[in-house]
């Protein structure tokens, strides 16, 4: 099966020193990780697990993978898990110490509670926001993150998200 996406990451910081890996997603829906220290390659997720996976690094402890059909997954270098099958999307990013997942078909942004990648409880500061800016017509086509800003690319415009503030359960951008 052909490689459709490939990422260079570090995982395993919770167990000690982070290990460099080359993570490869194949057209058959599987995922392999090559340990760049030892040269060994291991199956992380079996075929048909993913349809269109995107990966983001969470600290140097794990990777978080989002798939528009099958949800949210994570891998810490040892244990591969389905984190939340209901959190699906197209473009994940880590910003301001939390995971954000952008959904192209609805232009929604799902964000985790502060300092988490897996807590989506509204009472803990997580939430969902639909991007309804008038000059954004069509679907989100990509994102890019810097220290202070998330750039959201749409079919006809670019939007910036910045100045994240949280007051109790209310989150303001």
Image: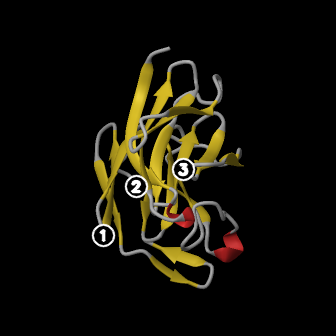
Task: Examine the rendered structure and indicate whether residue 36 appears above or below residue 145.
Answer: above
Between marks 2 and 3, how big is the CA–CA gap? 28 Å
Quadrant in which residue 50 is drawn:
top right
Q: Earlier in the sequence, mark 1 or mark 3?
A: 3
Are there few (<14), some (14-19), or many (20+) residues within 10 Å of tag 3? many
**Left or right position of 136 against 158:** right
Q: Which residue is mark 2?
A: 133
Of the pair 9 and 145, the residue shown nearer to us:
9
Q: CA distance from mark 1 to mark 3?
A: 21 Å
Give coordinates of residue 156: x percent, y percent. 29, 39
70 vs 14, left or right, is right
Residue hosting label 1: 148
Q: Earlier in the sequence, mark 2 or mark 3?
A: 3
Q: Secondary structure at mark 3?
A: strand
| Eye-nearest disc, 2 or 3 | 3
**Are the residues at dot 1 and dot 2 in contact (C-beta closer than 8 Å)?**
no
Q: Position of residue 172 (x, y in %)?
A: 47, 75
Image quarter (top left, top right, bottom left or bottom right) of the C terminus: bottom left
Residue closest to the eye, 141 or 9: 9
Q: How is the image coloured?
A: secondary structure
Badge 1 or badge 2: first in the primary sequence: 2
With respect to residue 56, does 46 lie above or below? above
Res 64 label: 3
């Amino acid at each position: 099966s052909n490689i459709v996406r490939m990422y260079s990451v570090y995982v395993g910081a919770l167990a000690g020193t982070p290990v460099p890996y080359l993570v490869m997603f194949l057209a058959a829906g599987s995922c392999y990780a090559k340990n760049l220290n030892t040269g060994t390659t291991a199956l992380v997720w079996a075929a048909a697990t993913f349809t269109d996976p995107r990966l983001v690094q969470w600290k140097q402890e794990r990777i978080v993978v989002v798939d528009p059909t099958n949800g949210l997954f994570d891998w810490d270098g040892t244990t591969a898990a389905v984190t939340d099958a209901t959190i699906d999307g197209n473009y994940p990013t880590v910003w301001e110490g939390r995971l954000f997942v952008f959904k192209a078909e609805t232009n929604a942004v799902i964000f985790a509670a502060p300092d988490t990648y897996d807590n989506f409880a509204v009472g803990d500061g997580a939430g969902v926001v639909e991007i309804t800016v008038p000059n954004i017509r069509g679907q989100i086509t990509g994102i890019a993150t810097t220290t202070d800003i998330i750039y959201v690319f749409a079919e006809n415009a670019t939007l910036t998200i910045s100045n994240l503030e949280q007051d109790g359960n209310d989150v303001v951008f």
